[in-house]
Amino acid sequence: MKKIARRDKMKIYGDLLSILKAETSLTEKIVLVRIQTKLNVPFDRLKRYLSDLEELGLIEDQISFALTEKGKQYLAEYRTVLDFMERMGIAYR
């Protein structure tokens, strides 16, 4: 069995915000199971991450999943960091 590398919260939050942004632009109804599958986490952990994002002010609520301005800024900065690390030849998985 292939071992999956562990992700830190910065990566999980970045991935989750990216997924939410893509899903909200594609459909008007968000399906948590689809998000869970794309993020590859158990459902209870997904709910906890969504709650964390709401508490941090990165998403509006756990119904609409709309990114706040702070959430959009986090995602932009996260992508900047990933781009920088790639240019420096540092693998971040």
Image: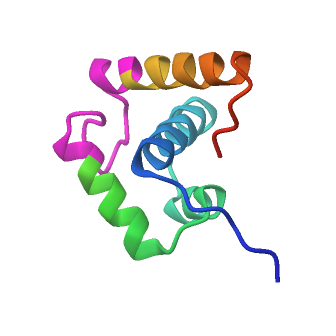
* Residue 22 in picture, x, y percent from top left: 60, 34
Q: Is residue 84 left or right of residue 20?
A: right
As displayed, is residue 67 above or below residue 20? above
Q: Quadrant of residue 90?
A: top right
Q: Which residues are magenta?
A: 53-73
Q: Residue at x 35, y 42 (%)?
A: 64
Q: Quadrant of residue 51?
A: bottom left
Location of the N terminus by quadrant is: bottom right
Q: Residue at x 61, y 64 (%)?
A: 40
Q: Residue furthest bottom?
A: 1
As displayed, is residue 46 above or below residue 57? below
Q: Is residue 87 left or right of residue 71?
A: right
Way the structure is coloured = rainbow
Q: Residue furthest right?
A: 1
As displayed, is residue 78 above or below residue 73? below
As displayed, is residue 29 above or below residue 72? below
Q: Is residue 85 magenta?
A: no
Q: Residue at x 49, y 45 (%)?
A: 16
Q: Main secondary structure of the magenta part?
A: loop
